[in-house]
Amino acid sequence: MAEKTDLENIKDLLICDIPEFTPPGDGFLEIIGLSHYENINSKIYAYFLNQQKEPEIAEKFLAALFELIQQKKADKIISFDDYEVSTEYATNKGRIDILIEDKNNQSAIIIENKIYHFLDNPLEEYFEYINGKPKNKVGVLLTLHHLSTQELKNIDGNYINITHKEWVDKIMALGLPANLNPKKYIYLNDFFQTINNLTTEINMNELAKFYFNHTKKINSALLSLQEAQKFIDTQLQILAENLKLNLYGTTNVWRNLWNKDNYNNICYTIYFEPLFKGENKISIIITLEGDKLEKKSDYKALIGEGLLKDKKLDTNKGSNFCHFITQEYDLTLTEIENFADTLYDKINSDFEPIMKIINPKAK
């Protein structure tokens, strides 16, 4: 059977039910690039577990953790009255990521926090180093996903595996305090969002599955995108030649058209990104730069309201540029097929009369 052509692959893809997917929002740790750092993650847990600083939140965090421990290790008897939370707690052979310890009751929860790193810590030594009877201590391997049966075989029997999401979900199920400070509520939900994002990253979502099930068809569709971008690029080059201007830029978002010999800090900007976002729209813009920015008010007076009809003023500004005059156009497929001619006609009818007023020496 003959291989399907790229066009046939694309037609097949278009009749598929593509799963909807909304990317999760970034939390603060994602924004600053620290979401996968275990020590940062541990400090946040420790902060919310601190009964002196956050008693109501700490109660929820601890109650959720106790519930999960009882579900997975019911023979442990952990009792906390006055406990302390430490991070990077030094032992003879390493550092415990998070230690929750009540020295009076000789009870402790020893948490090894794992985001992406391989589990190769001296867990038995951690457990023995902390005072207390074995039944009053429990080790927790806090991971993004459940460890495999084989991984669990190599782990000391005093440890149980709890995922970050299990802990967070249990906290949410218990409910946050009704009178929680709004700022703390934002911090807490931001952290929960980070945990959900980290968990989502390691699991294949429906959109990723869709790609692997339709790889050839999707690659054909990507090829069609490249051909569409190449077409627009060629058409813009033709437009520049027809206008006797130079084309500047390499993006698939915008290009500038300017007079190399008499630039004069004024140019056309063609904004065409919507064509690749599902909207048949483009914008033609007169952009001012440098010393021409100071003359905007004078230009407006010279141009008059008649030529400015249906156009927007000052739509985008920077320290040294301004989109002085902008007009957006809805294009038909036929107009896109004749992109260079379409833009040439619109520039000549809608913008050249203005350009002759504000830049009379351009040609």
Image: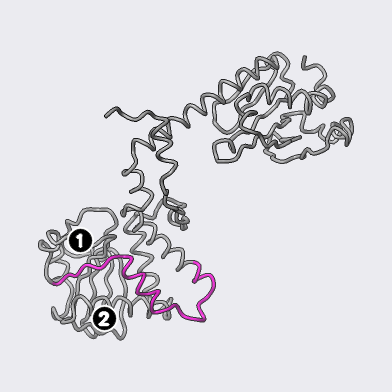
Q: Which label was assigned to residue 17?
A: none
Quarter of the image for residue 280 reads: top right
Mark 2 vs mark 1: which is more N-terminal? Answer: 2
Quarter of the image for residue 165 reads: bottom left
What's the residue at 79%, 25% (across, down)?
A: 349
Amino acid residing under circle 2: Asp
Quarter of the image for residue 273 reads: top right
Question: Residue 76, position in %: x, y?
Answer: 18, 81
Is 325 rendered above or below residue 74?
above
Question: 21 left or right of 323?
Answer: left
Question: Residue 327, position in %: x, y?
Answer: 73, 36
Is 222 rendered above or below residue 183?
above
Q: Which label was assigned to residue 147?
A: 1
User: Mark 2 to mark 1: distance in Å?
Assistant: 28 Å
Is 247 rendered above or below residue 293?
above
Q: Which label was assigned to residue 102?
A: 2
Q: Is residue 162 magenta?
A: yes
Q: Which residues are magenta?
A: 158-186
Q: Dot 2, how many residues are within 10 Å of its Cα: few (below 14), some (14-19), or many (20+)?
A: many
Looking at the rendered image, the quarter that the C terminus falls into is top right
Question: Residue 81, position in %: x, y?
Answer: 30, 86
What's the residue at 47%, 66% (across, down)?
A: 187
**Between residues 286 and 294, which one lies in front from this camera angle?**
286
